[in-house]
Image (cartoon, grey):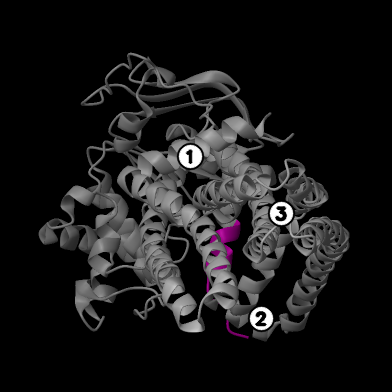
Amino acid sequence: MKCIPLIWQGLGLVWHSARSWTMAWALLLLVQGLVPAAQVYLMRITIDILAVGGTRATAETAVRMAGPPVLAIGLLWIFSLVLASLIRWVRAAQTELVQDSIHALIHTKALELDVAFYENAESYDMLHRAKIDALSQPIALLESIGVVLQNSVTLVALAAMIAMYAWWLPLLLIGSALPGLWSVARYVLREHAWRIANTANERRSRYFDSMLTDRTSAAEMRLFDLGEYHMASFRTLRQILRTGRLALVRAEMKSELFAGMIAWGGGIAGMLWLLMRTAHGLAKLGDLVLCYQAFLQGQKLLRSLLESAGRIYRSTLFLENLFLFLSQMPRLVVPVKPTPFPSPLREGIRFERVTFSYPGSTHTALSDFSLTLPVGTSTALVGHNGAGKSTLIKLLCRFYDPREGQIFIDGIAMDRLDPAELRRSVTVLFQEPVRYHSSAADNIAMGDLTAIAERDRIHSAAESAGAAGPIGRLPQGYDTLLGKWFGGAELSVGEWQRVALARAFLRRSPIIALDEPTSAMDSWAEADWLGKFRQLTEGHTSLMITHRFTTAMHANMIHVMADGKITESGTHEQLVAAGGHYAASWRTQMQDLAPNPKP
């Protein structure tokens, strides 16, 4: 069966995460499983003593004789309470260790996978199920197996007791519970199928919930009166999910009622048989009590066993999601013996007839694209949105491989380099940089964690990027917590971009890529930053993507892109003199920037 390997995988995960705690847990469960059977046996002895004492001796003598087994029952009851507390403690320790281990596995795999993994909805569904559904399942699996083992020990002991009266009594006990097993298995399969089918709806409901409660969307929710729209969307999804869950529960309730009636009938049949034997003097009162307790507890144990079996099966189904995610492999091939990254760069970077489409897209982002970035020079790319400019940076970082063509660094094909070493040699300011909810100094240090304690380097990077001024106005300067998630100070969009720019320049990499570095800056901040641009990129091979020609004109070479290809190239002066698309766009942009003439 498919679930058996998954059970072993799940148990193996628990074993490697919390070995000593798991052994202690198993031992405690084994001991706890014997306690109920011992209590039933002692109850039989007590009843027989009291029944005999009422006819052959005085009441005082009967009570005195029953004292030891009654005391033993009481001690077993206290012992079972102590065992239950110990098991809860051990289980809590197990749970923490196993969940930390699973988090580590998921985080490691999430970082290992290519950026392309996050480009489609199916991947998000898989990751959602791994994080939400499967995270607690190894411990749930272990607990369910523990219940099965514990209850099995008790059930075997009880079955052995009632088998002394008739060989078919244990079969009657177990057989009457089989319809319950069918009911549980059927419900688990239906529930799992429903969860798989509704993963997207669950994710959408979380999305609408976050839009209504998240700070980043609060302003637009109010300005454009979007609250009721998102609330209605959330309610619609919740109604779909709620209706589906209630339908499952109703179906389970009917099956449980049917199975319970059969189990009840089996128990009654066994009790009537032993009652008749007792009435004819073929069994003692203690035997009747033992059989009643055995059937009563046995039915409960079997029901618990069936539910635990259902939970085991459910856990294996959800563990499949976890192990499916963990089995995903990166598509980018890492060379077995990578070529060392050239240091220092002597030639530069060359895109040679590169064709590329994003995964799952029919649109070609780059088509037969060729471009050279000479070492030690700054190159600007301009063009309309969707021309393929930002795609070059992603290929340069080897987040993706070209469909056709090749990228060379100092004549070495990029796919022969170690991706980790390559990325350490590239500094990138992305168009939408991450806002780390940490101190201002830590935000900058994220560009090079080796400099986290080197405040001089952090201050220098902030000065170079124009971030020193905004940081200096913060309550605790560089130690000020940024972002509202944890109660820190908030920056403007342009100030966040300057902090991200400081992070990029802290890295000291030979290759610098800037995607719209001044898009969120005001004209004064842009002028100040452009004044330092050549100084910041001196000695580096830099690629700058921008819509602002006032920024592009500071590069050594400008290339105009359209439809994934280079259409014009030259310095700013050469392109303006050529009178092409760049020149026309330059004149339009300058007219837009010019003040309105007085009437």
> Is residue 596 magenta-colored?
yes
**Contact between labelled residues 3 and 2, with CB atoms less than 8 Å apart:** no
Q: Quadrant of the C terminus?
A: bottom right
Residue 548 or 190: which is nearer the viewer? 190
271 with respect to 210 (left or right): right
Q: Indicate the amino acid at tag 3.
A: Thr
Where residue 227 appears, x then y in whole percent? 71, 82
- Residue position for label 3: 199
Find the distance from the CA under tag 2 to the CA under tag 1: 47 Å
The magenta region covers 588-599
- Residue position for label 2: 221
Q: Secondary structure at mark 2?
A: helix
Residue shown at the point (68%, 70%) measured from the top left: 208
Eye-nearest disc, 3 or 1: 1
Q: Indicate the amino acid at tag 1.
A: Leu
**Contact between labelled residues 1 and 2, with CB atoms less than 8 Å apart:** no
Identify whether 564 is placed above or below 103: above
> What is the crowding at mark 3: few (fewer than 14 residues within 10 Å), some, or many (at least 20)?
some
Identify whether 468 is placed above or below 581: below
Does any portion of residue 34 appear in the rendered image? Answer: yes
- Residue position for label 1: 11
Where residue 408 appears, x then y in whole percent? 41, 20
**Contact between labelled residues 1 and 3, with CB atoms less than 8 Å apart:** no
Of the residues under marks 2 and 1, which one precedes in the sequence?
Answer: 1
Q: Indicate the amino acid at tag 2.
A: Met
Residue shown at the point (18%, 48%) measured from the top left: 450
Identify whether 203 is placed above or below 117: below
Does any portion of residue 554 appear in the rendered image? Answer: no
